[in-house]
């Protein structure tokens, strides 16, 4: 109910305010009282709101999986270096033309090209992480490997940025701010398909995730194939994080904080409850952040990354101080 209410408010607010009644009619009643409002709702705000729901849910679930797998409350969806790989792919596309030369870039700098470059970069890092995951038995070693990949790709991006011209650098910077409003219905359908593929890989691992809370030895004593479960969790997280970064850019805070907020509210560690709960909480927080970023009645739109961090971090700090513990 709260999610649907926030969803309607998100659709009604923006540079042009649309009454919630007309938003509801535009979605379910065959059209609002204004043709221009219908066009704005169906072609701009609805795809953006649905993107916000997918991004918030996907990042929150990924963060929960990583915190459980690595037993680290500071682990988030980007610890595997997948987001860094996506960022490197986009940097090579946008900044590479300045450094390597125009002949290096064949696809241009449009949204589809950026998504393809980000996907290829994410897949490259994913492949290496999955290969190393089978060679390394220690789960914490995988975490360190992911962090090292992040540092390595950040170094390459810094070199590319140093030699790039101002126009390309600005374009890459805008992409790094994150955005929810650049997807067409066709792109959103691809996003949704890959998103649900990642979700399908999560559901068979609920028992494994609950077992891992009590330690790897306990999980093995239950007959759990730890290597297979770990690979499945890593793959699902990588798919969710990769597709979100490819289509929306790297978005901070949500994946790290929402699992903690959800655990505090529900006071449970059962992933059968937590996974749908963090998905709903993440979607709600992302929609609220997007509504604030739109600066209602203004033509300006703030970077979504600025909103998620600016308003989210103090809330989490307050919750942690009030709760006085983190799990």
Image (tube, rainbow, N blue to C red):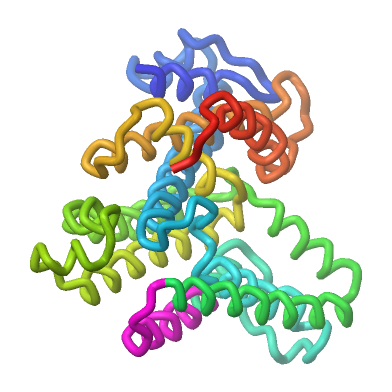
Residue 100: image x %, image y %? 78, 91
> In the figure, 127 relative to 19: above or below?
below
Residue 65: in magenta span: no
> In the figure, 34 relative to 46: above or below?
above
In the figure, is residue 302 to the left or right of 12? right
Residue name at image x 24 percent, y 76 percent? 227
In the figure, is residue 179 to the left or right of 184? right
Residue 194: image x %, image y %? 34, 60
Residue 189 visible in the shown view: no
Residue name at image x 39 percent, y 73 percent? 139
Q: Which residues are magenta?
A: 121-139
In terms of depth relative to the viewer, which is nearer, 288 or 101?
288
Image quadrant assignment for residue 217: bottom left
In the figure, is residue 23 to the left or right of 214? right
Residue 133: in magenta span: yes
In the figure, is residue 306 to the left or right of 283? right
């Amino acid at each position: 109910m709260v999610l649907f209410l926030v969803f309607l408010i998100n659709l009604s607010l923006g540079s042009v305010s649309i009454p919630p009644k007309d938003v509801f009619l535009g979605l379910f009643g065959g059209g609002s009282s204004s043709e221009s409002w219908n066009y704005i709702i169906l072609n701009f705000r609805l795809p953006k709101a649905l993107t916000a729901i997918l991004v918030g849910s996907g990042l929150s679930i990924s963060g929960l999986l990583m915190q459980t797998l690595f037993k680290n409350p500071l682990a988030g969806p980007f610890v595997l270096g997948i987001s860094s790989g996506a960022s490197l792919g986009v940097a090579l596309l946008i900044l590479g033309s300045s450094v390597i030369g125009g002949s290096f870039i064949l696809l241009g700098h449009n949204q589809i090209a950026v998504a393809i470059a980000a996907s290829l970069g994410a897949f490259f890092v994913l492949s290496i992480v999955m290969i190393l995951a089978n060679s390394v038995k220690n789960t914490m070693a995988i975490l360190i490997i992911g962090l090292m990949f992040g540092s390595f790709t950040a170094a390459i991006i810094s070199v590319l940025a140093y030699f790039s011209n101002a126009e390309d650098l600005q374009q890459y910077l805008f992409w790094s701010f994150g955005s929810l409003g650049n997807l067409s219905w066709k792109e959103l359908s691809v996003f949704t398909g890959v998103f649900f593929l990642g979700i399908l890989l999560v559901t068979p691992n609920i028992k494994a995730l609950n077992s891992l809370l009590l330690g790897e030895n306990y999980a093995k004593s239950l007959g759990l194939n730890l290597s297979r479960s770990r690979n499945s969790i890593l793959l699902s997280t990588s798919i969710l994080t990769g597709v979100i970064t490819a289509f929306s850019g790297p978005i901070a805070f949500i994946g790290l904080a929402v699992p903690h907020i959800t655990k505090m509210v529900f006071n449970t560690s059962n992933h059968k409850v937590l996974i749908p709960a963090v998905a709903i909480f993440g979607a709600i927080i992302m929609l609220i952040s997007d509504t604030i970023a739109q600066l209602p009645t203004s033509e300006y739109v703030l970077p979504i990354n600025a909103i998620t961090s600016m308003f989210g971090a103090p809330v989490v700090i307050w919750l942690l101080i009030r709760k006085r513990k983190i799990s």
